[in-house]
DNA sequence: TCAATTAATGCAACCGATTACATAAAATTT
DNA sequence: AAATTTTATGTAATCGGTTGCATTAATTGA
């Protein structure tokens, strides 16, 4: 076979002395085509090394069989497992994936959304950046009727389908666990409260404090960007507090690890002096010392659920506008970083 | 604008009373079109909310403006930064990315290659799975003249363009460093020696031992699959050795962290009893205790270089078959896990 | 045996952009 | 002013499948 020469259904048709329409139908397993002809078509396709031209097909059908995924970063355990879940479902269903990440920038997020829109994805799965406030960049999708599913970082007030965990509950049980371990002054380290996930976790945190009769001061809330530098700074700030906190609930395992390192460097013992609870159950939590208590939630399931809902909608099996909010299970995993009492 | 109604260049042409050809040219900044007309075209395109139909374009031009990326996993720092590098270059050049991962399975790798081939990527960037032995699944690309670039895990004997680091040298300096720190019995923990990266690192390791007059026994080489379980087993095996090793060179930071954890659990002090050097400079290395000495190499640069070479080739700026092997810089980062002597 | 169904296949118009070639209009040269 | 060149635009074929409708062949029924 010479390079550059592509085999088309016309070539197959000519060789077999039948019409291209028949070849097309045969390739699609259209029941109108006899088994005999179909077999001949497939055999000839193999022989000639035929491959479908998806561009011709998509052009004609005016659908791309592509799903866009918009995430903030690719660098966490959580996100990669969500992607794995999405990928599993979409490949099974014969869809391609176009993945874009915003590096936590609302501007880049909007640019990516625009790009995916121009690429005509059939549907979009997205998790918002830190500083995204307006959802305007998703409007074109809505106007064209392209279905959207948000996961994890979402805007819940809008009429979107969202796949999330119960962040408030997670925040509550994480905090409650610290309280049960005897912590009296608990600090919460988190990111922009404009994002639902952080706002909800914070809410759970506050509720738990309140329900257990612990008071709260503004200084017990540290908001930053979840970078390494921010983790170090948060730890230093806590070291200066009087009295020092005896418990920390941090919204992310990486920052937890950084904080713990800094605290330890400054002579504090974990969990005796300060107990720590993280969030996400990244691999790192089990490798640092002491091992990190954290909230586990199944990224892969979230990805699968988001993708499955979108695809069912696309195939007309179900309507995405009916199921508005899907809550995925989550749990507290208790390890040494918070254990001050015998189990 | 009603959903479902797509604006085409014909619509623009009709409104402006010019031909679709002119619109097409105007949109492409073809110099044959007067500035005035071009402006009218762009304005009308904006007004109508026109978006290019890439499928029509690709069909006509018989090129997809898509580059396939084939990697073993998405879960490491290294791979995500390579992807970031690739993405940067390809988006700048207006290419899309189709990313597939093989989960370290040669079978899945072949399936992904087949899929990307059928999707007609214009070029392919790949890093091989553990157990890939044959490169047959890349043949169709070669036959059709689709350019290939391999990075990191490559097959060097073939006539492919590869982007790599000097793994032998890295293995050498890592080992030499341990020797300089006074290690007499060094164990190397790595993965399948069929893969160039591991084979070369092992070679460097052996050469360093030899050059410094240290003898080597088979038991000093532990080959596994770089999983958590494998890391624990490797550590346990070393604990049973008589005499126990006083240095370890591990081919990956995650496994290093796991090994260190197990060794510490068994009462060993690092680096006093055993010094450890990892590979990759993952974030984890700086969070565990003691911080991990490791080899750093810039994934983002590798990605950029691989992508840039591929794209230059596609654009006819350069020929990929000329530059056969590109070696990216790498360096040893010394941290506490190996430091037995004052710097 | 012949009409009425049903099954299998073909015809031809599309999807939306690109581009070689032709043509018209404007600018320049002689 | 006519001829020539340059600039701007139009015509129509093409890329490779898909699909509504028409047609033919095979099967069934009367």
Image: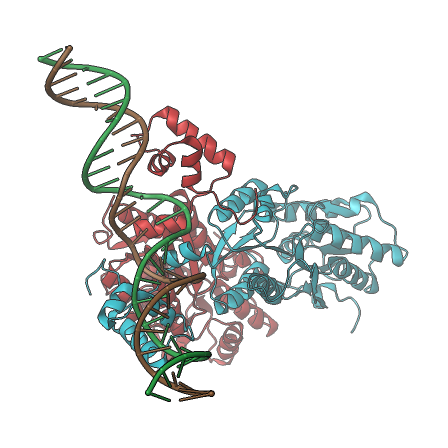
Chain colours: A cyan, B red, C green, D brown
Where A71 sits versus B289, above or below?
above
| Residue closest to the eye, B176 or B310 | B310
Q: Quadrant of the C terminus of chain A?
A: bottom right
| Residue closest to the eye, B218 or A284 | A284
Residue B281 visible in the picture: no
Q: Quadrant of the N terminus of chain A?
A: bottom left
On the image, which quarter does residue B171 sit in?
Answer: bottom left
| Residue closest to the eye, B121 or C20 | C20
Residue A220 picture location, percent across and down: 79, 47
Residue A298 picture location, percent across and down: 63, 66
Q: How many marks?
A: 0
Q: Is D7 on the left or on the right of A305, as rendered? A: left
Residue B87 picture location, percent across and down: 43, 49
Residue B312 visible in the picture: yes
Q: Residue at x 22, y 70 (%)?
A: A15
On the image, which quarter does residue A260 sit in?
Answer: bottom right
Residue A165 picture location, percent across and down: 70, 61
Where A187 sits versus A86, above or below?
above
| Residue closest to the eye, B165 or A198 | A198
Q: Is A138 on the left or on the right of B240, as rendered? A: right
Residue reaching furthest to the right = A213
């Amino acid at each position: 076979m010479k390079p550059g020469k592509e085999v088309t259904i016309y070539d197959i048709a000519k060789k077999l002395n039948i019409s291209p329409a028949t070849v097309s139908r045969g390739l699609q397993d259209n029941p109108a085509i006899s088994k005999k002809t179909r077999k001949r078509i497939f055999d000839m396709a193999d022989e000639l090394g035929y491959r479908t031209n998806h561009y011709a097909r998509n052009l004609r059908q005016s659908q791309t069989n592509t799903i866009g995924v918009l995430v903030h970063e690719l660098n966490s355990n959580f996100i990669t497992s969500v992607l794995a879940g999405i990928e599993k479902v979409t490949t099974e269903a014969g869809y391609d994936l176009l993945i874009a990440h915003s590096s936590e920038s609302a501007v880049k997020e909007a640019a990516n959304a625009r790009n995916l829109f121009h690429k005509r994805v059939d549907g979009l799965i997205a998790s918002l950046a830190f500083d995204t406030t307006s959802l305007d960049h998703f409007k074109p999708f809505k106007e064209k009727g392209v279905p959207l599913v948000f996961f994890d970082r979402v805007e819940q007030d809008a009429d979107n389908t969202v796949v999330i965990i119960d962040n408030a509950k997670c925040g509550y049980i994480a905090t409650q666990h610290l309280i049960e371990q005897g912590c009296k002054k608990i600090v919460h380290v988190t990111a922009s409260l404009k994002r639902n996930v952080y706002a909800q976790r914070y809410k759970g945190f506050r509720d738990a404090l309140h329900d257990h009769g612990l008071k709260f001061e503004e200084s017990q809330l540290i908001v930053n960007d979840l970078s390494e530098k921010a983790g170090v700074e948060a730890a230093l700030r806590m070291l200066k507090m009087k009295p020092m906190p005896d418990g920390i609930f941090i919204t992310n395992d990486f920052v937890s690890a950084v904080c713990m390192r800094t605290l330890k460097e400054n002579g504090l013992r974990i969990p005796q002096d300060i107990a720590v609870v993280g969030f996400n159950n990244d691999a790192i939590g089990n490798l640092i010392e002491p091992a990190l208590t954290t909230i586990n939630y199944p990224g892969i399931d979230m990805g699968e659920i988001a993708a499955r809902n979108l695809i069912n909608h696309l195939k007309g099996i179900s309507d995405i506008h009916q199921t508005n909010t899907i809550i995925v299970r989550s749990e507290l995993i208790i390890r040494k970083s918070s254990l001050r009492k015998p189990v």
